[in-house]
Image (cartoon, grey):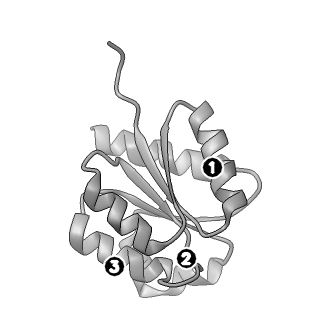
């Protein structure tokens, strides 16, 4: 049997962004899970012990990504989290420092792909 696929949870309230992530990262060989809110993401993390990485939007309806990040670090601090947002200003927020990486959203997903690979490589080591 082959090597287990890495499971990535993408959290974004924009359905088009979720579809993009699912399409692109499934083709890259990852197992993709999607959540549309911080609340959904926290529930999925509690129900799935095998999530390898979380990509989390900051500005979402309901609970913000930064609030979700605080909960995730407290509950499951062993899962790397990448904050992925259209707003670079959040890098100055102390809460964002809890994340393992910070990527500004772009139609070009190269930065996000690079950070995912870097964190999964570090996790594997």
Element type where label 2 sits in the image: loop
Vertical order, 7 against 29 (above or below):
below
Quarter of the image where one finds residue 73:
bottom left
Q: Is residue 111 left or right of residue 102?
A: right
**Closest to the observer, 84 or 8:** 8
For label 2, the residue is 58
The quarter holding residue 46 reads bottom left
Q: Position of residue 85 (x, y in %)?
A: 62, 71
Residue at figure coordinates x 66%, y 78% from the top left:
87
Label 3 belongs to which residue? 70
Indicate which disc, 3 or 1, sits on the residue closer to the N terminus: 1
Q: Mark 1 sits on what residue?
A: 21
Quadrant of res 97 = bottom left
* Residue 13 against residue 61 in the figure, above or below: above
Count residues near mark 2 (Cα–Cα under 10 Å), then give few for <14, some for 14-19, many for 20+: many
x and y percentages locating residue 5 in the rendered image: 40, 31
Disc 2 from disc 3: Cα separation: 12 Å
Sequence-earlier tag: 2 or 1 = 1
Q: Residues within 10 Å of mark 3 (few under 14, many from 20)?
A: some
Going by the picture, which residue comes out furthest to the right? 107
Q: From this viewpoint, which residue is outermost toward the top?
A: 1
Q: Nearer the viewer, mark 3 or mark 1?
A: 1
Is residue 3 depicted above or below 14 in this figure?
A: above
Mark 1 neighbour class, 10 Å CA radius: few under 14, some 14 to 19, many 20 or more: many
Please tell me which residue lies in front, 45 or 114.
45
Q: Residue 12, how many percent across, how many down? A: 58, 66
Q: Find the distance from the CA under tag 3 to the CA under tag 1.
A: 23 Å
Q: Quadrant of the N terminus?
A: top left
Real-space CA distance between mark 2 and mark 1, rounded to the nearest whole angstrom: 16 Å
Circles 3 and 1 in contact, beta carbons < 8 Å = no
Query: What residue appears at the point 41 percent right and 42 percent down from the top-left corner?
Result: 7
């Amino acid at each position: 049997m082959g090597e287990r696929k890495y499971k990535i949870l993408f959290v974004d309230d924009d359905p088009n962004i979720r579809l993009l992530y699912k399409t692109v990262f499934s083709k890259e060989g990852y197992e993709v899970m999607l959540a549309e809110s911080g609340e959904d993401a926290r529930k999925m993390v509690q129900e799935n012990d095998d999530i390898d990485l979380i990509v989390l939007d900051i500005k979402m309806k309901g609970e913000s990504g930064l609030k979700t990040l605080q909960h995730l670090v407290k509950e499951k601090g062993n899962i790397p989290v990448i904050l992925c947002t259209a707003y670079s200003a959040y890098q100055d927020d102390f809460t964002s420092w809890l994340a393992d990486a910070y990527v500004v959203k772009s139609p070009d997903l190269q930065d996000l792909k690079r950070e995912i690979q870097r964190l999964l490589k570090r996790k594997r080591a």
